[in-house]
Image: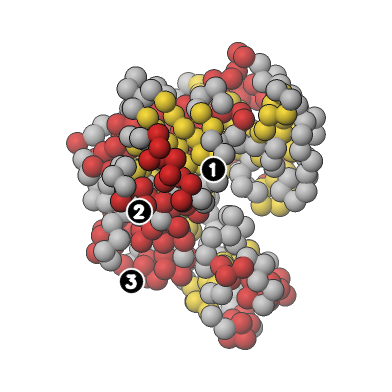
Amino acid sequence: MKILVVGGGGREHAIIKKLKENPSVTEIFALPGNAGMEKDATCVAVKATDLDGICAFAAEKKVDYAVVAPDDPLVLGAVDRLSAMGIPCFGPNANAAILEGSKVFSKNLMKKYGIPTARYEVFTDMDAALSYLESAPIPTVIKADGLALGKGVIIAQTREEARDAVRSMMEDKCFGKSGDQIVIEEFLTGPEVSVLSFTDGKTVKPMISSMDHKRAMDNDTGLNTGGMGTVAPNPYYTPEVARRCMEEIFLPTIRAMEQEGRPFRGCLYFGLMITPDGPKVIEYNCRFGDPETQVVLPLLESDLLTVMQATTNGTLAETEVRFSEKSACCVIMASAGYPVKYEKGYPITIPQAVEDHVYVAGAARRDGVLVTNGGRVLGATAVAETLPEAIRDAYDMVGTIHFDNAFYRHDIGKRALQAGKEA
């Protein structure tokens, strides 16, 4: 089988490595991929948002199955386009990807179907939003409606911060058209949990839970990033929490989307807050999370391609989705200055002994040498019997990898270990 994977980061590298385990896979094309995944896939310089280019390439190579991984091409309708050509796909159609593409849509869906989430108000008029803030509880959360590279959410600790956030989104258009509508919502408290799930539009099979680390610096300080590391499983996701999530959130969401005529197939990511009142939805993503994928997929014992095809074919109920009972830790190595300003072009050295456990996100090839080409450069993932062992092994791996200007957090998994002690 010839597989096409749309995307070019660490998440896609993790997906590709897992797909390679299926003996029927003869070739994997990554569009655009990056130079760090060349040993695992044929990288083709077609942007993930170039739907015409993707479709032309898929037709030329007679691709048998396509995996659309990032949010942008999903929201733009990449699955619709490829499916219309007769190429089966993993991922939601555009009318279902709106679950991530519009925060207003997702919040209104949750309200309509009684799915637990933070209280909120929607605004299309800046003056009305500013007026509302005069009496809104502080801290508060302000979200741009559309996609904003994961940066369209601001937690305002003061009223002035909240007003600045509204003006920057609605007046200054810092997120472009994504800020034409905004959501102002209640600030929730509690531990966060990420749960990715496979779904064929009727059945939902959650993957192992994980804990992301968004802040750039140790002890959860510094700017928000795309994620500096992850561990799995998440100790806050107890069997009782899992049961409530399935009954109150996961199945109701899938049924709501079907009821709306927008059946969701692919990977649905639930960003959850375990509040004193129980689990609530912070956000939905219409695809695998990054870097959650880099700890979740290494723990998947079932065949990934088989499970993906089951979401496409509507046979997920009869398909086994089994995960290891081990633990995993991924430490992201980034370029100094990320997520604001950073330099590129530094040679990367990855020892052969750890190559299989490294997922490359931002790399290029210059004069035959692998060099840094992004903020987040790579993730080193270790799987072990226990979480302390996985954390230790991941950091041991990081110690063997080198590029100038590298920086990483030294406390990935610390909160999870503390939670484990408290349990």
**Mark 1 neighbour density, 10 Å: few (under 14) some (14–19) many (20 or more):** some
Q: Which of pointers 3 and 1 indicates the residue nearer the eye?
A: 1
Q: Which residue is mark 3?
A: 112
State the SS at label 1.
Answer: loop
Looking at the picture, does residue 217 appear above or below residue 129? above
Q: Is residue 362 visible?
A: yes
Q: Camera-side residue: 161 or 34?
A: 34
The alpha-carbon separation of the residues under discs 1 and 2 comes to: 18 Å
Whether residue 238 can be seen here: no
Instruction: Find the residue positioned furthest to the top.
Output: 353
Three-letter residue code for mark 1: Val
Give the side of residue 19 with respect to residue 113, left or right: right
Residue at 54%, 32% in the rendered image? 43
Residue 408: mark: none
Image point (31%, 47%), residue name: 85
| Few, some or many residues within 10 Å of mark 3 (<14, 14–19, 20+) | few
Please give the name of the residue rendered at 50% of the width and 21% of the height, measured from the top-left corner: 384
Amino acid type for the residue under numbered disc 3? Lys
Report, in whole angstroms, how far the alpha carbon at label 3 lies from the one at label 1: 40 Å
Q: Residue at x 71, y 33 (%)?
A: 372
Above or below — where is 173 with respect to 262? below
For this view, does 156 lie left or right of residue 235? right
Name the residue beneath numbered marker 1. 46
